[in-house]
Amino acid sequence: MTTQQTALSKFLTGYTAEVTSGDGKSIKAASEKMAPGSEVFVASLPKNTLDDLVAAIVKLSESGLNAVPHIVARNIKDYATLDELLGRLVKDAGCDRALVLGGDRDEAVGEYSSSLELIETGLFEKHGIKKIYIGSYPEGHARIPDDVLEQAIRDKLAAAEKAGLEVELVTQFCFDAKPFIEMARRFRAQGITAPLRAGVAGPANRMTLIKYAMACGVGASLRALKERQDMAKNMIVGETPEGLLAELAEANEADPSLGLSGVHFFTFGSLIKSADFASEHMAG
């Protein structure tokens, strides 16, 4: 195994992956393909209910995986709803961690519009949630200025520390290593020490990647993917994150102060492809 392969294998160890609560095929694949204790993040689409989310978390937990529900401020009606949801996740599924997000819908369904408001309710620690993930954006956010975005991260980290919650940052995906590395260095220069997990797009055809990247507001790195698409002149050509991850792994080896804690795969309905890719590269 070359030095690059060794670094990549180490970086992939303990990878996390994301599915949606209604994607039964990927939820089943997670139990078959991922190591016991692995973290599987569970998002809910607008058509899915909180009951769907709880059911998916229970199924993953029963498979020996650590399920990480997306708790989205703009999807929560009120304090009582959040209280009940967290209670069910902990009692029914033994859940002890969550990804806390503001949400992208234009109008909140209830009284919360930001993840900070959820953290400040005190309900996470009340129910025994020990760790939260907070989203971060290597290429910025389409609707939020960079300075506001990064101040919000500092505010959320402070609120989580006050609540006694362990925190890890997890990023939106992009297709270039440079934004990840620059953001990590910027955070460390600001005194932010929380581990930073790099979100990447799992293996998929380029048309799928471009579709999701546009929907998620992925920025400058999307141009590079489109250029490769145009050069290929074939909308079904596949794309894997091998080059991107190798670059991140080597950068983290060379400069451990970056604090990159590992890889988070956005699987776009095919967790199998991401899990198989990870297994192949961890085995060398």
Image (cartoon, rainbow, N blue to C red):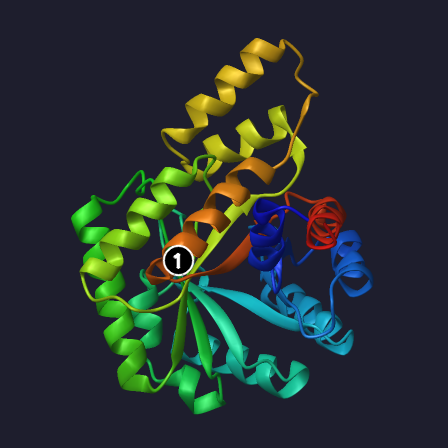
Q: Which residue is mark 1?
A: 135
User: For mark 1, does the 10 Å Cα neighbourhood hold few (<14), some (14 to 19), or many (20 or more) residues?
Assistant: some
Residue 168 appears at what percent x and percent y? 41, 68
Q: Is residue 91 visible?
A: yes
Place of residue 190 in the rendered image (x, y in percent of width and height, measured from the top left): 18, 61
Q: Position of residue 249 (x, y in %)?
A: 50, 50
Quadrant assignment, res 179? top left
Task: Left or right? Give the position of 252 relative to 93.
Answer: left
Q: What residue is drawn where x is 66% and y is 59%?
A: 21
Residue 177 higher or lower than 155, as above or below: above
Please give the name of the residue rendered at 56% of the width and 67% of the height, measured from the top-left corner.
69
Q: Left of 86 or right of it: where is 167?
A: left
Whether residue 16 appears in this view of the structure is no
Q: Closer to the camera, 28 or 169?
A: 169
Residue that appears at 68% across and 75% down: 37
- Between residue 128 and residue 188, name the one nearer to us: 188
Amino acid type, label 1: Gly
Tell me which corner region of the image, top left, top right, bottom left or bottom right, holds residue 176.
Answer: top left
